[in-house]
Image (cartoon, helix red, strand yellow):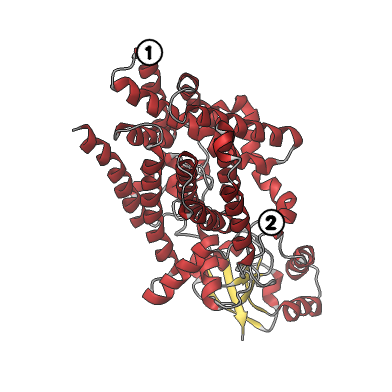
Amino acid sequence: MVRRLAWLFPISVVLWAAALTLGHTWGGDMRLHVATVLGILRDPADPLDPLVGAVHGSPYYSPYTYLLAGVSRLTGLAPQAVLEVAGVLNVALWLWALHRFCRRLGPGPLIPALALLFTLLLWGLAPRAWSGFLGLFSLSWTMAYPSMIASALMLVIWDLFLGHRADPRGRARPAALAVLLALVVLVHPFTAVNTVLGLGAFALADPRAALRDHRLYLAGAGALGLALLWPFGDVTGLFGAAEALTEIHRPLADDLTRQFGLAHYGLALVGLPALWARRKRPLGREMLLLCGLGAAVVATGVVVHSWGLARVIPVVMLPLHLSPAAWFAEAARGAPRVRFYAGATAAACLTGLYGGNGGLTRLLWRPVEAGTLATWESRDPAVGYAPLAGRIGSGEVVATETTWSGRVVNAHGGLSLVPAWPYPFVRDEPERIRAVETLFAAGTPAADRQEVVDRYGISCLLAGRGSPALGLRAFVPVATAGEVVLACRR
């Protein structure tokens, strides 16, 4: 009976993911990933970056997005549809990987079921929707993102490492580790950092078994070598871009420093007693080290203002989710029970369900009020620039009066003049920003506007009705939506 109920929960989560997908109510970076698939479809052999088409290749062109582009090409499905299907499959893969890893904590079906429950709910009253964050609310937005499949692969890598540590015979596991770790590096580098942090914690927990095994070092070197061989993006370029990308992670650090992080992550603290109590149980030392190392990395990032290190938060949270799952499963098999702890954990889960209820209310498929969208930091995908962007041809360069509207252009196959997302790989971005200002400024002579158009090969303009750029003779309005006009070359 317990086994059947335990399996019912992950099945319900997959059905939830499928039902949510049918609503097509996406926001955040979904447009970026659609644009990435479209960029591959334009030129699979040598794709230009999917945002402005200024450089060859992109870190977003990973094996995952190439797989999605291949499916789109073979099936004829639109890239967004392929991503939506991939999102459901990603959830199923992550659930399988979580179940597989939880076997290391102890036998029986109760541990994976409780681990899933706590992972979805034990965050805070104001959880963040962010890549790699696996709470209920965040998952409802990010299930199709590369971070989701990378998170599943991370658990598989950890499981393989622990299996090899326990039984180091053979070469199959080290070889698999090399291939999977290379995939995670290419698919989602932030998750790769978390993966390596976990491997480090597991090695320190039993250094004799792990640190002396030369095959594990060879696996690490092999993973790096395979990642460097990938022809469609330079992994080493990410290190140079780290400083440029750090500012977008400031909100994560602010969440930690405001109210001691309790609003966003406080519910996970209910797992601390179990984390400590299980330090001598299976995988207990590993979970304690992982949580401690991760917390040290995040704290260092806050102190030195390297906000990108806040992306380690998911591996700080995971031990706080898995440890109580294992503790309660052990208690169910006869270990001493603590009713107060069980009640506190149940109350924390109910509170987390309330805090993450946006992941459930999005199933309603009805128009969402503006205030709710603002809380979700999202926009209504059915209004605004979308009706106009459908008129843009694949690969056409579109100058937009607002940076945000460039995201809609990218999601429909067009290229914006400036990156609509933080993207430090376009070296002439400052010059492009000045060009946009020149193009849409009220006092710019017509000749200067035309020079910008010719320099960047601009095919269309997306601007408000009163924009002076729409007065260029070479452009005629082709579509309007409210006060917004799409004008393209004759």
Identity of the amino acid at label 1?
Phe
User: Circle 2 sits in a helix, a strand or a loop, which is it?
Assistant: helix
Q: Name the residue under label 1.
A: 340
- Measured Cα–Cα span from mark 2 to mark 1: 47 Å
- List the residue tagged with mark 2: 238
In this rendering, position of residue 12 left or right of residue 21: left
Q: Nearer the viewer, residue 9 or 476?
A: 9
Note whether 90 is above or below 55 in the view shown: above
Q: Is residue 319 above or below residue 199?
A: above
Say few, some or many: other residues with alpha carbon within 10 Å of mark 1 (under 14 / 14 to 19 / 20 or more).
Answer: few
Task: Estimate how packed mark 2 is, as few (under 14), some (14 to 19) or many (20 or more) residues with alpha carbons within 10 Å.
Answer: some
Q: Total number of numbered labels?
A: 2
**Percent x, y of residue 188:** 56, 54
- Residue positioned most to the front: 169
**Residue 154 place in picture, x, y as percent:** 50, 47
Decide: marks 2, 1 in contact (CB < 8 A)? Answer: no
- State whether residue 339 is above or below residue 180: above
Vertical arrangement, residue 309 with respect to residue 469, above or below: above
Q: Decide which of tag 2 and tag 1 comes sooner along the chain.
A: 2
Residue 316 seen in render: yes
Taking 444 as reference, is 358 left or right?
Answer: left
Residue 379 locus on image (x, y percent)? 51, 52
The quadrant of the picture occupied by the C terminus is bottom right
Question: For the point 18% across and 33% down, which residue is it?
Answer: 1
Residue at (52% x, 64% y) in the render? 63
Of the residues shown, which amino acid type is indicated by label 2? Leu
**Closest to the observer: 322 or 167?**
167
